[in-house]
Amino acid sequence: MIDALETIVRSLIAFFTLLIFTRILGKQQMSELTYFDYIVGITIGSIAASLSTAPDVLAFHEWLGLLAWATLALGLQLLAVRNRWFAKAVEGEPVVVVHNGKLLEKNMRIARYPYMDLMEQLRNQGVFDLSDVEFALLEPNGKLSLRKKAQARPVTPQDLGLPTPYEGVSAELIVDGQVLDANLRQVGLDRAWLSGELRRRGIRLGEVAYASLDSQGRLYIDTRDDGISRPVDPSDYRGPN
Amino acid sequence: MRRWLLYGSMAAWLLAFVALLNTGLWLKRLPGQADHFLQLIETIEEHVRAERWAEARAAARALEDEWQGAMRRLFTGTERRARNEVGEAIARLQAALQAGDPTATLLEIATVRYRWRELGT
């Protein structure tokens, strides 16, 4: 009984310690992690697993290991933000692998980046002809950033000299029937205005699944009942999904 | 303000975990009380040296009960292997007392004392 309780308590401690450490370590996306970040993440997870299920090792020592790895990772992050030289030394820097449609073999060799991977990443970005590429850079996280030649790029309003209005970001006003007062205040409006708009459209607050206001002042409202009797179902599979 | 509250609560949780994981060090004896476990070992040793075997065996049973209670409050701050070693040492001590062998008993007493001191460190 005590052994089972011990596993539960150790697991709870490992779980919440990981939660706190990952919250402190920041908002980096998985796709933005360098290989080293990835390995550090795996090591921290592995120590937490050991803290949870290796009762023959003193839990506090495991926890200290977790603390040490998280502190080192945080220290590296802070140093990398403050010191550009250090950031380059630790995280590496982008390598140009294609310049004006030409492969830079020497750079590819230095980065140990195979042709097959380059071609695959180019195809993933809709490029099937190397001569369409102006620049391609291999980022420290292993992703390929590329700039197509002007002839291969889609036409933009800028190319046509067309003026475009400022679009900004829409403010969420209602999510799942709940009014987000802070967002309402941020756009200089209040509940009375929102109630008036809903009344004008004949919608009750409880019926709203989502509502937002764009920078042009247009209110978008999605109700729970969309009035679609038969939604399009692309599946031909009748089992559980 | 809310940010500091968040970091403060995180720090408080981490400190609580540190305290919980170190119960092996500071809950061996309950606050304000003597170390009953060590006291019982001393008592057993005195009885053995005076060859009062019945009293020594009774004290060993009390030591076993004390250990069962201690295990319940120390399990988060000690290794399972170390706890098993204490339990095993107590069983060996009881066996030596049953045999009435003073040399073996004193050896086992020393082992139990050592295991208890090492527990949670």
Image (tube, coloured by chain):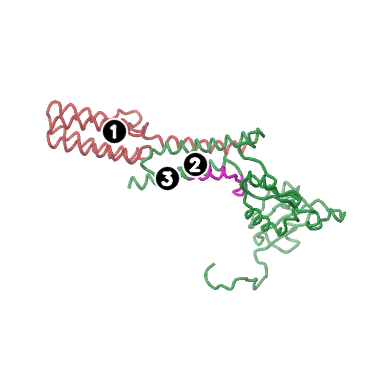
Q: Which mark is residue B115?
A: 1
Identify the residue at image location x=49%, y=45%.
A45
Q: Position of residue A212 (x, y in %)?
A: 71, 55
Host chain of mark 2: A
- Magenta region includes residue A8: no
Q: In terms of image quadrants, where is residue A196?
A: bottom right
Q: Are marks 3 and 2 in contact (CB under 8 Å)?
A: no
Mark 1 neighbour density, 10 Å: few (under 14) some (14–19) many (20 or more): many
Q: Which mark is residue A52?
A: 3
In the rendered view, tell whether residue A207 sits above or below residue B91. below
Give the residue at mark 2.
Answer: A17
Identify the residue at image location x=31%, y=30%.
B117
On the question of residue A35 being in view, the answer is: yes
The answer to which of A197 and A50 lies nearer the viewer is A50
Q: Position of residue B109 (x, y in %)?
A: 21, 31
As drawn, is A121 to the left or to the right of A238?
A: right
As drawn, is A140 to the left or to the right of B46?
A: right
Q: Are marks 2 and 1 in contact (CB under 8 Å)?
A: no
Host chain of mark 3: A
Q: Secondary structure at mark 1?
A: helix
Quadrant position of the N terminus of chain B in the picture: top right
Quadrant position of the C terminus of chain B in the picture: top left
Q: Amino acid at mark 2?
A: Thr
Q: Position of residue A109 (x, y in %)?
A: 63, 46
Q: Residue furthest right?
A: A161
Q: Position of residue A177 (x, y in %)?
A: 64, 57
The answer to which of A60 and A211 lies nearer the viewer is A60
